[in-house]
Amino acid sequence: MLHPFRAYIKYILESKNEYSVHSPFVYDYITKGLMNKASIDLINIQLFKKALLKNHEQIDITDFGAGSKVFKGNKRIVSKLASKAGISRKRGELLFRTVNYFKPNTILEIGTSLGISSTYLAGASQDAQVYTLEGCPVIAGIAKNNFSDFNFNNIELVVGEFEKTLPLVLKNKKIDLVYFDGNHQKEPTTAYFKQCLQAAHEDSVFIFDDIHWTSPMENAWKFIKNHESVTISLDTYKWGMVFFKKNREKQHFCLRI
Ligand SMILES: C[S@@+](CC[C@H](N)C(=O)[O-])C[C@H]1O[C@@H](n2cnc3c(N)ncnc32)[C@H](O)[C@@H]1O
């Protein structure tokens, strides 16, 4: 319970702004990507989320992985799930701006839920193909219908346990951006990271949600940022991001954004 609070104090003490970043690659991404003030068209994404917030249907969900700190049992109201489990508008915009900046062709999201974050990933670039993985068939069904209703035609939703679907989706692909937002536990997170490495390349971007959520997730993040394949890592408290640029010394930045 106390872990996120302690981790946040540490982050506040250690984090710096963009001017302290002595990496042109990271500075450029922060200033021209994340902090870019150019307006972005989020209307279709907002309509997608609004439809979920108006849906007060009760559903039975299949619970995988780390469970929830917010919900108890296996019954959910769709509107509540959308407001509590879906990505916040601020983080969604950061995802959108990240896709705009790096221009990935192939994006993988591990953890769809109702698909809110998928729409930020897909909405930022019609040219990108987004693969998104979800284990609960009922939640996935709602996401799939809404992707179709709101014309998010560049999203392919793959239903099933990550342990089965991830190897199938990764097969024979190079992935440019991965958003890890499912099963927030240490062993699965590091296992998915290692599997995704096989499909990564020098310009791939991996984003991990909730790296300071629990002490085991903190350890997963330590393992990932210290991994030999990672040359640059960013901690923005909620997200950890890693890059694989070759022929560089390892660099880590704790950033306030
Ligand atoms: C935090 S939610 C994703 C939220 C979504 N990315 C968003 O921001 O809108 C994580 C999802 O991963 C799914 N999940 C967790 N562990 C899983 C597993 N082992 N296999 C398949 N799905 C899993 C859960 O059912 C849940 O819907």
Image (cartoon, helix red, strand yellow):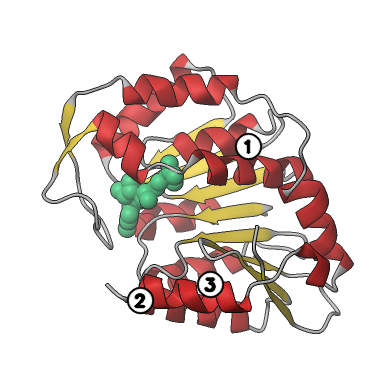
State the residue in front, 24 or 137: 24
Label placed on residue 65: none
| Residue 43 seen in the current view | yes
Q: Residue at x 52, y 81 (%)?
A: 222
Q: Could you tell me which residue is drawn at 19 percent across and 42 percent down?
A: 61
**Residue 160, percent from left and from top:** 33, 47
Residue hosting label 1: 129
**In the rendering, at what x and y percent does residue 230 appear?**
68, 76
Indicate which label's residue lies in the foreground, 2 or 1.
Answer: 2
Report whether 234 appears left or right of 65. Answer: right
Depicted 23 relative to depicted 37: above or below: below
Q: Which amino acid is tagged 3? A: Lys
Density class for disc 1 (Cα within 10 Å; few <14, some 14-19, many ≥20) is some
Establish whether ligand 1 lies closer than 8 Å to the Cβ of label 2. Answer: no
Circle 2: residue type = His
As drawn, the residue found furthest toward the top would be: 149
Q: Earlier in the sequence, mark 1 or mark 3?
A: 1
Q: Residue at x 77, y 45 (%)?
A: 101
The percent coordinates of residue 149 (x first, y second) are: 45, 15
- From the viewer's side, name the closer residue of 13 and 39: 13
Q: Which residue is mark 3?
A: 194
Q: Which residue in the rendered view is the most extreme toward the right?
A: 24
Residue designated by label 2: 3
For the residue labelled by badge 3, is the local secondary structure a helix, a strand or a loop? helix
Distance CA(mark 2)–CA(mark 1): 36 Å
Graded by Cα atoms within 10 Å as few (under 14), some (14 to 19) or many (20 or more), the crowding at tag 3 reads: some
Which image quadrant: the N terminus?
bottom left
- Horizontally, is 99 left or right of 137 in the view? right
Identify residue type, mark 1: Gln
**Disc 3 and disc 2: Cα gap in Å?**
25 Å
User: Does residue 46 sit above or below 181 in this rendering?
Assistant: above
237 or 230, nearer to the observer = 237
